[in-house]
Image (cartoon, rainbow, N blue to C red):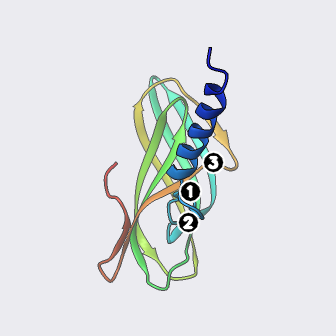
Amino acid sequence: MIPFCRPVASSLAAFVLAAAVPVGAQPLTEPSPPVIATSCSGGVTSIELVEHASYDVTFRNTSSVAADDVRLAIPYGRRKVAMFDVHAIFAPHADLVQHLHKNLSGGLFAYASDQNTCDVRYVHFVDGTSWGTQSH
């Protein structure tokens, strides 16, 4: 029996854990998108195994450059995401209201909400620059 092994092991674990996290380190966070969805109401209806998504979304371009393409992801159901490519002129520091609709993959899911989670995944600007990734 070695009575001092436990405190040594605990001290060693605390040292290794402390050494692995740099002093003053911040958790990794994604930068906020330059175009945001400030309002996102609507939902999904299902008719004869066809899901139809219909949303009213208010966008705000928080950058100083106009955007002309935004990819929006709206999760619904269990692990499903409705993706929308919105082609419009998003003027700097201005709101733009869009009615988005499309048929989704087959299913029987239906719901409606006044406030959905709407994530901007990609923004393309008129000067040729972009933010985010174009992949679905």
Answer above or below: position of 36 versus 10: below
Does residue 68 sit above or below 64 in this rendering?
Answer: above
**Mark 3 or mark 2, which has the lower sequence index?**
2
Disc 1: which residue: 27
| Element type where label 3 sits in the image | loop
* Residue identifier under label 3: 116
Instruction: Give residue 7's quadrant in the image.
Output: top right
- Residue 11: horizontal and vertical position, in percent? 62, 39
Amino acid type of disc 1?
Pro
Q: Is residue 105 left or right of residue 108?
A: left
Q: What SS does tag 2 mark?
A: strand
> Nearest the camera: 78 or 68?
78
User: Mark 3 and mark 2: span between their CA atoms?
Assistant: 13 Å
- Dot 2 amino acid type: Ile
Q: Which mark is residue 36?
A: 2
**Label annotation for residue 49:** none
Q: Amino acid at mark 3?
A: Asn
Contact (Cβ within 8 Å) of mark 3 with mark 2: no
Residue drawn at (52%, 54%), measured in percent from left and top?
119
Q: Give left or right: position of 114 versus 105.
A: right
Mark 1 or mark 2: which comes first in sequence?
Answer: 1
